[in-house]
């Protein structure tokens, strides 16, 4: 570890949605930090608060949601306390973001080269010509073939994988220190997924990026993440180095997630997690997983603390049944 | 620009070129514009010069379209009248498109209270028929070139507000707008650099149809005497004079009417052709 603070530090982040005049927490008191060159994977089902966490970090929450407490430090600047202007300046410059849908995340009527260069004109005040030149370099960096000729091409002339590369070039144009990747490979087919992930990993090393990877694909987690955070109902229920997570998944929800993943060995039966995430208005008090948990007990009505397990201070679980 | 990059434009352009209606409409409108531009040199007579010896003379080789009740050359008056009609039409449409688009994009992008106010105001304005609205405004402001442009532009604004707002609403939900926000782009940049180019094709099509409507409104106002006051020649004004002398000199009403008709048909053909050419669902 270096002496400089990690590019992204989140402390006690709580994000709430106002429904019928009542506040419902969609992200509850989560804390984490990501160091340079480190990848933190955020996993969980749809509706568990992964994307809300990412949107909180970038300050792009929908109008009904807001960060109600906590600090989000991007290179030491608190995004929560900062003005909208400051947040706008940091987005795209210090924090890059790539999205799930490369097919629709580029503007269909503007040439690729302009779109990649635009971030540089916006944040670094580059001239049109300089931005175009830098856009060509960036397209080469993300290995778009014949980059120079493709500067004037439009998004519809690119395949999904190529468009995701362009999105990566866009996100990294201003050389941010934090990259948020929200399901970056979900819409791509498997061979392209591997290429895109390898590209991200490569660029991460080159640029020293702190990557927050949001995914529900545990295969992707196993191949690129350094640490894993499992979220359920807005709570972090388990946090562990990637190896410990796959060797000793401890929270019942983590175990259920892994059991629901297809494997080559075994009897070929997937074990779905019974039930579904309860709606926000019907979240149980205490541990939110209790309504689907095989290990439920009386005490689960109170929320357990994150407790280290197996003598590893990095591996923490939020479960009464699992804390020794 | 490389060959592949201009592919999209090429398809729209080549589709447009292959549409005979659009090409014909384009030629008609261009001829009219050129005629208006060269009127000072091309008109054989001073449009306002009266000749009492030649009152209501039918078309012949000297006076191509005949003369009116004051002995003025109708052909020259139609050329000069094109200047008024086309100027008012283009200016009013341009002003209406720009103002309407800005208001519509902003309302659609931000939504909320701004949007509701804009929609309410638009609905009120649109409930007046275009002609009544124009008539009302000219009557209040007084008949002059500037006031005509203002009055007709005002009637065009709500239509473009409504179109731009609707299209922006649909665009706002697209992923690339979120991507723009994640890059720290300001609302202003997103609205006018990213959303606007995506809705421009619809606006252009509608503008060409509104251009026809604006010219028609100007002619109608001129017909009831609310355009630029005489003796300045306007198409509607000449039709009015022809109407008064319909039995003695039918050509007086026929020729300016034909000019109006030609421009209407030309602009509508352009509008339809552009719409078909820019419609991705249309057969190639």
Image: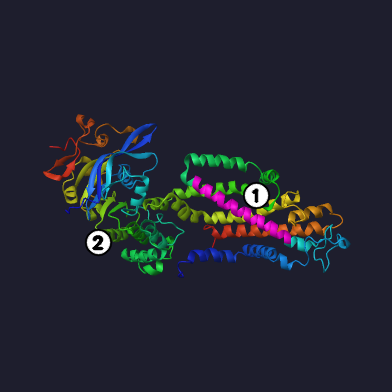
* Residue at the disc numbered 1: B152
Mark 1 to mark 2: distance in Å?
A: 60 Å
Residue B84 part of the magenta segment: yes
Quadrant in which the C terminus of chain B is drawn = bottom right
Residue B125 part of the magenta segment: no
Snapshot quadrant of residue A70: top left
Q: Can residue B195 be seen in this view?
A: yes
Q: Position of residue B179 (x, y in %)?
A: 38, 52
Query: Observer-nearest residue: A109 or A240?
Result: A109
- Left/right of residue A314 with respect to residue A277 in the rendered view: left
- Which label was assigned to residue A250? none
Q: Name the outermost residue toward the top.
A: A298
Q: Can you say whether B97 is above or below B63 in the image? A: above
Colouring used for the render: rainbow
In percent of the image, x 46 and y 69: which residue is there?
A: B1
- Left/right of residue A103 with respect to residue B92 in the rendered view: left
Q: What element carries label 1?
A: helix
Label the magenta part by its dominant secondary structure. Answer: helix
Tag 1–tag 2 contact (CB < 8 Å)? no
Query: Observer-nearest residue: A104 or B73?
Result: B73
Q: Position of residue A72 (x, y in %)?
A: 28, 45
Q: What element carries label 2?
A: helix
- Left/right of residue A75 with respect to residue A324 in the rendered view: right
Disc 1 or disc 2, which is closer to the eye? Answer: 1
Q: Magenta part of the protein: which range? A: B80-107
In percent of the image, x 39 and y 39: which residue is there?
A: A64
Q: Name the outermost residue toward the left.
A: A311
Please, which chain is the residue tagged with disc 1 on? Answer: B
Q: Can residue A269 be seen in this view?
A: no
Query: Observer-nearest residue: B102 or B146?
Result: B146
Query: Observer-nearest residue: A200 or A276?
Result: A200
């Amino acid at each position: 570890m270096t002496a400089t603070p990690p590019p992204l530090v989140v402390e006690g982040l709580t994000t709430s949605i106002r429904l019928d005049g009542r506040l419902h927490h969609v992200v509850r008191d989560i804390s984490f930090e990501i160091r340079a060159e480190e990848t933190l994977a955020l996993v969980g089902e749809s509706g568990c608060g992964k994307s809300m966490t990412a949107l909180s970090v970038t300050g792009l929450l929908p109008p009904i949601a807001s960060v109600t407490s906590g600090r989000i430090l991007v290179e030491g600047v608190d995004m929560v306390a900062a003005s909208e202007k400051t947040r706008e300046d940091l987005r795209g410059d210090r924090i890059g973001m790539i999205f799930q849908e490369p097919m629709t995340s580029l503007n269909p009527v503007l040439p690729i080269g302009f779109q990649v260069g635009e971030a540089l004109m916006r944040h670094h005040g580059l001239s049109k010509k300089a931005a175009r030149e830098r856009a060509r370099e960036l397209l080469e960096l993300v290995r778009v073939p014949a980059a120079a000729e493709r500067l004037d091409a439009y998004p519809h002339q690119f395949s999904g994988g190529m468009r995701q590369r362009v999105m990566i070039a866009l996100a990294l144009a201003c050389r941010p220190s934090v990259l948020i990747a929200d399901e970056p490979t979900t819409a791509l087919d498997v061979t392209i997924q591997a290429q895109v992930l390898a590209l991200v990993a490569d660029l991460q090393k080159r640029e020293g990026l702190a990557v927050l990877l949001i995914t529900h694909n545990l295969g992707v987690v196993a191949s690129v993440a350094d640490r894993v955070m499992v979220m359920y109902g807005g709570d972090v229920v388990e946090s562990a180095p990637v190896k410990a997570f796959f060797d000793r998944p401890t929270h019942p929800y983590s175990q259920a997630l892994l059991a629901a993943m297809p494997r080559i060995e075994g009897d070929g039966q997937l074990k779905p997690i019974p039930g579904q995430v309860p709606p926000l208005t019907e979240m149980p008090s205490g541990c939110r997983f209790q309504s689907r948990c095989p290990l439920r007990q009386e005490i689960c009505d109170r929320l357990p603390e994150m407790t280290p397990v197996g003598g590893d201070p990095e591996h923490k679980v939020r479960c009464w049944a699992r804390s020794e | 620009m490389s060959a592949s990059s201009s592919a999209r434009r090429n398809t729209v352009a080549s589709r447009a070129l292959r549409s005979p209606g659009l090409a014909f409409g384009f030629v008609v409108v261009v001829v009219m514009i050129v005629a208006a531009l060269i009127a000072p040199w091309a008109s054989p007579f001073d449009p306002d010069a009266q000749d009492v010896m030649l009152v209501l003379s039918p078309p012949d080789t000297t006076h191509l379209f005949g003369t009116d009740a004051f002995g003025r050359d109708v052909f020259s008056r139609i050329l000069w009248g094109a200047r008024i009609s086309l100027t008012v039409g283009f200016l009013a449409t341009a002003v209406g498109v720009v103002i309407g688009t800005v208001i519509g994009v902003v309302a659609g992008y931000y939504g909320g209270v701004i949007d509701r106010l804009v929609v309410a105001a638009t609905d009120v304005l649109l409930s007046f028929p275009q002609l009544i609205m124009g008539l009302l405004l000219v009557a209040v402001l007084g008949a002059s070139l500037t006031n005509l442009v203002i009055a007709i532009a005002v009637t065009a604004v709500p239509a473009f507000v409504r179109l731009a707002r609707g299209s922006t609403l649909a665009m706002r939900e697209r992923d690339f707008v979120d991507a723009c926000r994640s890059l720290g782009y300001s609302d202003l940049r997103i609205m006018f650099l990213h959303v606007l180019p995506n809705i421009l094709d619809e606006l252009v099509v509608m503008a060409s149809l509104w251009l026809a409507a604006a010219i028609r409104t100007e002619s109608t106002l001129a017909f009831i005497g609310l355009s630029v006051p005489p003796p300045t020649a306007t198409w509607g004004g000449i039709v009015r004079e022809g109407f008064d002398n319909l039995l003695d000199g039918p050509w007086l009403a026929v020729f300016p009417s034909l000019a109006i008709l030609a421009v209407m048909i030309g602009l509508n053909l352009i509008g339809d052709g552009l719409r078909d050419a820019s419609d991705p669902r249309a057969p190639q």
